[in-house]
Image (spheres, rainbow, N blue to C red):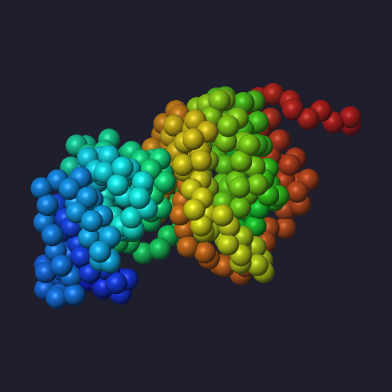
Amino acid sequence: MEAEWAQKLVAGLKQAGIDLVTYLPETRLSQILPLLRADPAFTLVPVASESEAVTIGAGAALTGKQVAVYIECTGLYVSCYTLVSIARRYGVPLLLIVGYLGSMADQRNNNVYAVSGAYIEPLLGALQIQFQVLENGEPMIRYDCLKLLAPRITDQLVVTSLSGQKIEWASLSQRPGNLLVGTMGTALGVGMGLAIGLPQRKVIVLESDGSVLLSLFNLATLANLDLKNLIVFVFDNQVYSGTRISEPTATAGKTDLTMMARGAGIEQAVTVRDLATFEREMTVALNGATLKFIVCKIEESVGHREITRTDLDPLENKYQFVRYLERTEGKPIFRGRG
């Protein structure tokens, strides 16, 4: 962790009223410890196990202390019993500060801790613990993601959802293999149909949080079809952000689309929060042969409102797309009467 971010984290703890921290040291966030020790507002309690950090913290919280429990992610597994039997059972308020090992962005000992890191978010969801992953990098916006994806497209078929995805993708890519669907709740279904009909072609769907929330039934179907040639990118900005509106979606609250996809049975469902991780997951998906469901947590951006919209009529787009399939697949699809 960079010094600036360590200072911000400690300042945030102080502002939130945290005055007691139980901890078992780890390396990812260790820069916060000298800052905590130097500030008389905090009482630090070193412990011998992460489970003990929870029980001591819970006891202190019952006396009116505002408690944070600082552990590494493997310690979350160790402390599950006390989190459930004490903290959750008795409703004791605790803030968990967990060093995230083995995420895609974590290059230190990644091969050692990758399995541990992969289960952290599902575990927190199963324990019904609300969480937020903090990144060091700049906020990610959809247009930057699409700029990384556009030059990687060769013969893949790309289906867009409405509004921002459609406008930005059409400005970055004018390929005949684009199907610019412009309605909510439909792109994922259309993409599944294309992947079924053309199992030898890679199909990419560009979706939004609002659109997926409107078609959650697709997740169960997608999981059971297990389409190996389908990649789904869900750009989750936590708002309904059209040409004029900006209202929160359910993902601005407790709803987690990655957890919902995993719950439906989509095994390769992941969340990315920075461009470097997006690029890695994108590359793995494009080069692989398995269903991928990638939720991209992005900042709200209104840049698409300034982009000139494509003048391609929906029917014209349909015929252009189908004629492209006819040429590249070598078979007639639409037969005109002539």
State the residue at coordinates (15%, 75%). 39
Q: Position of residue 15 (x, y in %)?
A: 30, 74
Looking at the image, the residue that sits furthest to the front is 63
Quarter of image, res 31: bottom left
Image quarter of the N terminus: bottom left
The total number of labels drawn is 0
Where is residue 203? Give x, y as percent.
56, 35
- Find the residue positioned furthest to the right: 337
Depth check, front residue: 307 or 275: 275
Question: Is 32 rendered above or below residue 230?
Answer: below
Q: Which quadrant does the C terminus fall into? A: top right
**Is 64 left or right of 204, judged from the image as shown?**
left
At a point 11% along the width and 73% down the height, the residue shown is 38
Residue 244 visible within the image: yes
The location of residue 279, given as percent across then percent down, is 38, 48
Q: Nearer the viewer, residue 184 or 203?
A: 184
Classify residue 161 as left or right of residue 127: right
Using the rendered view, name the quadrant where residue 284 is placed: top left
Q: With 254 as the anchor, is 113 left or right in this view?
A: left
Establish if 200 lies above or below 253.
Answer: above
Measuring 61% from the left and 65% from the top, which residue is drawn there?
247
- Lateral position of residue 26 relative to residue 196, left or right: left
Residue nearest the observer in this picture, 65 or 46? 65
Q: Is residue 153 above or below residue 36?
A: above
Q: Residue at x 47, y 62 (%)?
A: 299
Quick check: can you spot residue 102?
no
